[in-house]
Image (cartoon, rainbow, N blue to C red):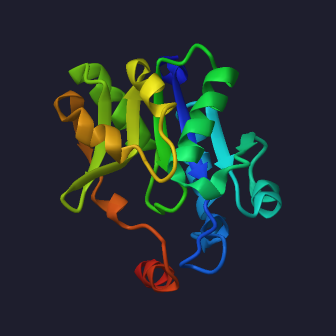
Amino acid sequence: MMTEKTGILILAAGNSSRLGQPKQLLEFNGNTLLNHTLGQALKVSSSTIVVTGSKKIEIERELHPSITCNNPNWEKGMGSSLNFGIQQLLFTFPDINNCIVSVCDQPFINASIFRQLIEIQKRTDKGIVASAYSDTLGIPVLFTKKYFGKLLKLSGNEGAKKLLLEFKEDVAEINFEEGATDIDTIADYEQLIKLR
């Protein structure tokens, strides 16, 4: 199957400090944000892992039966969870050639976006394919195998963005304007509910 060599890593370890409650469990269109993201990812690749951290028990209880891994050092920042998640993904699915890194607070993410990342990588042969929105490039982002070592070196608050900037010449992009909508505050969530 075309997509089986692509793993998907969903980062869901943060404590949503600005929101005051786990954003992973916010409801939208009859589903939690995390379950929605996970469901869309599983339509594309069975090699999917969710990295949990803060509120591990409540969050893992909400998930479809799937592989989760808990980052004991989640408080050290996104780089820590990214590094930890890549290790787990490679241990569990050692034959993957690509990895898509996603988050759980983009309510409009869908399987089509994940598929486009894979298709554009095949078409352009670039090592990184990122999502374009709000005049920036960001997540979800696909990395080919040659970047796995660099992802494993991330730490603290270093996210995937560092690699997008460092290797600009090896980056392709897809358009995902709705990726600009993410949930960091109660106001963001209220705005999302109004949109619905």
The residue positioned 73% from the left and 42% from the top of the image is: 68
Looking at the image, residue 88 sits to the left or right of residue 192; the answer is right
Residue 151 showing in the rendered view: yes
Residue that appears at 57% across and 45% down: 80
- Dividing the picture into quadrants, the one containing residue 125 is top left
| Up-down relation of residue 155 to residue 149 (above or below) | below
- Judge whether 4 appears above or below 29 on screen: above
Residue at 74 percent of width and 52 percent of height: 63
61, above or below 150, in the image: below
- For this view, does 62 lie left or right of residue 161? right
Residue at the (75%, 64%) spot, across then down: 55
Residue 176 drawn at (x, y percent): 30, 52
Q: Position of residue 59 (x, y in %)?
A: 75, 60
Residue 151: give x, y in percent of width and height. 46, 33
Q: Can see residue 47? A: no
- Residue 11 vertical placement versus 178 (above, below): above
Side of 106 relative to 83 (left or right): left
